[in-house]
Image (spheres, grey):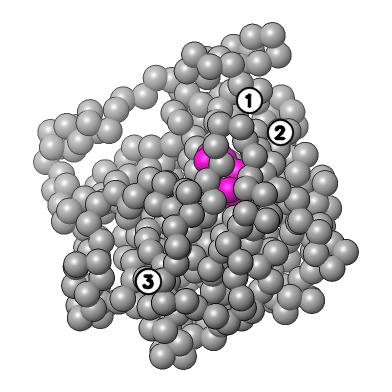
Amino acid sequence: MTAPVAAKYNVGGVLLAQPFKVRRLGHFGLYIEDMAKARTFYNDLLGFRVSDTAENIARRLPPEALKALEGEADPALFLYHGTDHHSFALFSERMRNLAVMRGWQVRGRQTTVQQISWQIGSLAEMFNAVQYCQAREIPIQRTGRDMPGSNWHTYVWDPDDHINEFFYGMEQEGWNRRSKPYAMYYRGFTDVPSLPQISEETELKEAFEKGIDVTAGYLSQDTLPPKYEVEGVILPRPFKVTKVGPAHVFVSDVDRAVRFYADALGFKVTEEVQYQGEKAVYLRAGSEHHSLGLISAGLKGRLGCRPDTSLMAFGLKVATYQQLKDAVGFLKERGVVFKEIPQELHPGIDYGAYARDPEGHLFLLYHYMEQIGWDGRPRPEEQRRKVEPGQWPEALEPMVDTYADAPFMGPLG
């Protein structure tokens, strides 16, 4: 167990204000009305692969919960873009109701945001996060290890009832695109785990000894034929999502939300923006300009966002400026609607395009995010790239931190 040292915590030999460190935004979840349309948008058009459906979840539900899902083809979808089991999750509104049946407290019915999930560094950090949140009366929804995904986690609410998940140990999807089979779900937990736990390697060895077919999991298959050359590879789309985030959410009190994420959870404030008399604050977990944007709810109507959600936009990064331009063209040709959002509300990102999903959620497609160096300061406004709305140059001159962040690990397709 991590012990406090002079009001700080020893986290892997480094003294921090919290007994954990958020490393990155790992995945994001939405509640959806029309799952069929959502699957077409996220799977077919954006290229997220399906790692698991609700089938395995349903096998673990009580009979009354199964009855509530009758007639719904895809009540839940787990999707991924890299090797994490899921970087995006879609749940039907009926799945929200099932949370109550499973004994989970549900808040935030005024939003379609299902969860914002942050990766921390170790199982010990996750364990210590539970005690830390309990001691500070940060409300916890649940703790354990869910299947599918196999990640150890705890879920907490922010002051605006957004569910934030801290997770460790996400299942990785390999070269054969198959997820972990249901027969290995016996390692799921519904409470705070004791420490230490056996490793994933030992779990796999146990599965072999039990005679489990570890290749029997869900197989992801692309829905479109490969025909576009993308950076030397033939892909079904002229782009590839290589990173998820940042998350931009509306909050009722920006200062209160900043205190929660910065003071309680350890995020670093990068920049504050004033727009039309309202405040927006952008916070980071690593070296990117921001992984979270907290935007005053007073801007929701003025920006034309869905009135019944707190999501302003969720970021999807592609590897290059050329892919960004090609993605916009590809999606527009297929009827996807784009919306203009002022550049002031995505500081640290130069060229970006906001696409609407079938239910009106906005997604910020971009290719570059400013990197924060050792001094913790963002680039001065006068040194940022000037972007003319609606203008897309053929090519761009590099910034000093162009291609400075980590590349996408693994093949594009």
Q: Nearer the viewer, residue 37 or 385?
A: 385
Q: Nearer the viewer, residue 71 or 322?
A: 322
Query: Does dot 1 land on a helix, a strand or a loop?
Result: loop
Query: Does dot 3 land on a helix, a strand or a loop?
Result: helix
Of labels 3 and 2, earlier in sequence is: 2
Q: Is residue 287 magenta?
A: yes
Q: Residue at x 45, y 79 (%)?
A: 328
Main SS of residues in magenta: loop
The amino acid type found where label 2 is placed reads: Ala
Q: Which residue is mark 3?
A: 322
Label 1 packing within 10 angstroms: few (<14), some (14-19), many (20+): many
In the displayed structure, 237 sits above or below 398; it is below
Is residue 172 toward the left or the right of residue 215 in the image?
A: right
The amino acid type found where label 1 is placed reads: Gln
Residue 203 occupies quadrant: top left
Q: Nearer the viewer, mark 1 or mark 3?
A: 3
Residue 64 in sight from this viewpoint: no
Residue 49 in sight from this viewpoint: yes
Of labels 1 and 3, earlier in sequence is: 1
Q: Residue at x 58, y 62 (%)?
A: 385
Residue 190 point in image, percent of width and height: 48, 39
Is residue 19 toward the left or the right of residue 270 in the image?
A: left
Residue 93 point in image, percent of width and height: 57, 70
Q: How many tags in the picture?
A: 3
Q: Which residue is mark 1?
A: 18
Q: Which residue is mark 2?
A: 264
Residue 384 point in image, percent of width and height: 61, 57
Q: Residue at x 74, y 75 (%)?
A: 303
Which range of residues does the magenta coloring cover?
284-291
Query: Does dot 2 land on a helix, a strand or a loop?
Result: helix
Structural distance between the alpha carbons of marks 1 and 3: 40 Å
